[in-house]
Image: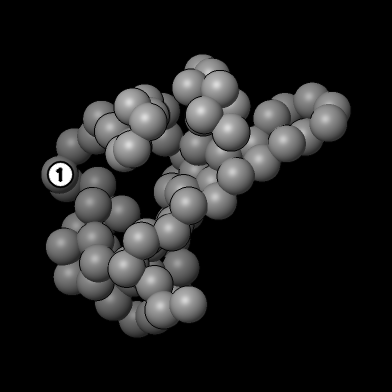
Amino acid sequence: MLAFLERPLVAVISTVSADGTTHGVPVWYRYDGSAFSIWTDRSRRWVRNLEQRAEVAIFLAEHQPPFAAVIARAGLAP
């Protein structure tokens, strides 16, 4: 799985808005073996959502067969 996460894939990060709806956006990322780094601007809606409600999921997928994918979540109830 580590080799998959280290590939240059575009990820979708999802957060929860103040009204309870989900908000997902594509992001570039880097995975260092234990954490994801995402470069963005603090004014982005998903960043503001995280400041209000620390729940996030990130989805990474290949764009061609076999369409492998990974979902990582933080701050979410099981």
Side (left or right) of 5 relative to 49: right
Residues 56 and 27: in front is 56
Side (left or right) of 38 relative to 64: left
32 versus 52 height, above or below: above
Residue 30, horizontal then vertical, whole percent: 36, 26
Q: Quadrant of the N terminus?
A: top right
Q: Residues within 10 Å of mark 1 (few under 14, many from 20)?
A: few
Query: In the rendered image, which residue does mark 1 sit on?
Result: 42
Residue 78, horizontal then vertical, whole percent: 48, 77
Residues 60 and 45: in front is 60
Look at 19% across and 37% down and name the residue there: 41
Residue 14, horizontal then vertical, whole percent: 44, 56
Which type of secondary structure does the marked residue at label 1 adopt? loop
Where residue 53 sits, quadrant-wise, is bottom left
Residues 46 and 61: in front is 61
Residue 6 in view here: yes
Where residue 17 sits, quadrant-wise, is bottom left
Hey, which residue is sitting farthest top in the picture?
Answer: 8
Residue 72, horizontal then vertical, whole percent: 48, 52
Hey, which residue is sitting farthest right in the picture?
Answer: 65
Look at 72% across and 28% down and name the residue there: 63
Residue type at tag 1: Arg
Look at 57% across and 39% down and name the residue there: 60
20 versus 55 height, above or below: below
Residue 38 in view here: no
Where residue 54 sits, quadrant-wise, is bottom left
